[in-house]
Amino acid sequence: MVNRAPIKALAFDVFGTVVDWRSGIARDAAPVLARLDRSDIDPHVFADGWRKRYQPALEEVRSGRRPFVILDTLHREALEDLLRHHRIDPAAIDDATLDDLTHAWHRLDPWPDSVEGLARLKTRFPIVTLSNGNIALMLDMARRAGLPWDAILGAEVSRVYKPLPESYLATARLLAIDPSELCLVAAHHSDLAAARAAGLQTAYVDRPHEYGGRAAPDADAAQDWDVSVGSLTQLADELCR
Amino acid sequence: MVNRAPIKALAFDVFGTVVDWRSGIARDAAPVLARLDRSDIDPHVFADGWRKRYQPALEEVRSGRRPFVILDTLHREALEDLLRHHRIDPAAIDDATLDDLTHAWHRLDPWPDSVEGLARLKTRFPIVTLSNGNIALMLDMARRAGLPWDAILGAEVSRVYKPLPESYLATARLLAIDPSELCLVAAHHSDLAAARAAGLQTAYVDRPHEYGGRAAPDADAAQDWDVSVGSLTQLADELCR
């Protein structure tokens, strides 16, 4: 076992790691699809399509081809694209409905262990978000779900989207600690791999229901992470001993 | 009475409004001054000198003559200047001592009503910092004092120091609300005046002990603020009815 620096703060991926985006988006999309008389579209498949769709948009920003815009904006654009894919004209839907559905990402429920796990981890470590979600999104979600963050960091603060190295390095810098003293907690191997490459410690949380039981798209990026657990309460068991 | 927009979030000035910087700095400076055999320097006067001294440095950044640097850096520079003013050579003191004393700003105690007041206000409104203090400073202080912020915003997030208008406008923008829906809570008339000029609502908290009982330097900037209270618990009484 490698000798690691003492952990001085925990940074969390949020979508999929702390909250269940797929169920939340499906729940809020279902009544909208029903009102559009499109109950033929499975709301969970709709959620998958939405989640998948903003990655190319993120890449436009990461590459520098597009100036930084917040995730709410990318979510809204991806929603319109997804609706068109289903042969629904977004221009035929009133703006308030599109806005409200975009804000479904602010209303995601935590996994059953998240609130207790974070509260326990917070007694020992500063806990901050390191998500691509914007500040208002993270704040609304935290207040609704009771996520007790010490600070909301991540994309809108550092102006860089994961998994660019600077997103991890900026977070350590904002906390005034060395990257080796910061541990990323995430359910995604690709995120952890980028964090490790930037010098962070890594804690993997298995979330087998994130994709409705199907394999994660980054399953082949698995490594031997510094910590590997099945829940945030188990992470507290490991780190707060 | 003017018809005001409903308040959607509260942004707090911190030094003087939520925490008692003068007592905290004096408490941590006293043993250092004693070790330097300079117990002739009143630690409260030392605190006043330090607080006063970083304003010109802030102005260098606000004016654009100097690129943005965090408050920890300005505090450290002001400390060295203050020591020289007292004919103490900072180079003769070890770096760890200077660093630790600079971090006294991370260890300030809240006023007696702050924690309860914030907790009650948080049940109704998002509560965020809008301080010139940097993120690590605000986070350390919040964890030590139990300040339950929903988010740490302010200078290091917006890259602008108060009282520039953009510092208030950026905070509203990050919260995805209109400036008229954001209320600044502060013990300083100058801060509130700038916030009002930027379109924010204003809540004044009287802190007669901030300067050890002497008049505040901005007493002549007093206006008829939207709300005026003597404590954060009283602010909760006013706003959470």
Image: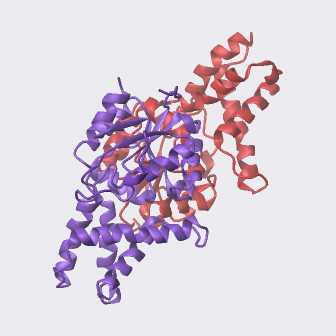
Chain colours: A purple, B red
Say which of B92 and A84 sits in front: A84
Residue B222 appears in view: no
Residue A93 appears in view: yes
Farthest front residue?
A220
Is residue A48 found left or right of A72 in the rendered image?
A: left
Quadrant holding the N terminus of chain B: bottom left
Q: Position of residue A143 (x, y in %)?
A: 32, 51
**At 61% from the left edge and 61% from the top edge, which residue is drawn?**
B165
Say which of B109 and A186 sits in front: A186
Q: Position of residue A19 (x, y in %)?
A: 30, 52
Say which of A190 and B6 sits in front: A190
**At 60% from the left edge and 21% from the top edge, which residue is drawn?**
B28
**At 72% from the left edge and 23% from the top edge, which residue is drawn?**
B95
For residue B192, above or below residue A119? below
For residue B237, above or below residue B38? below
Is residue B149 found left or right of B239 in the rendered image?
A: right
Q: Position of residue B101 (x, y in %)?
A: 64, 25
Which of the 4 quarters of the picture holds residue A138? bottom left
Q: Position of residue A97 (x, y in %)?
A: 29, 78
Is residue B101 found left or right of A204 in the rendered image?
A: right
Say which of A211 and A119 sits in front: A211
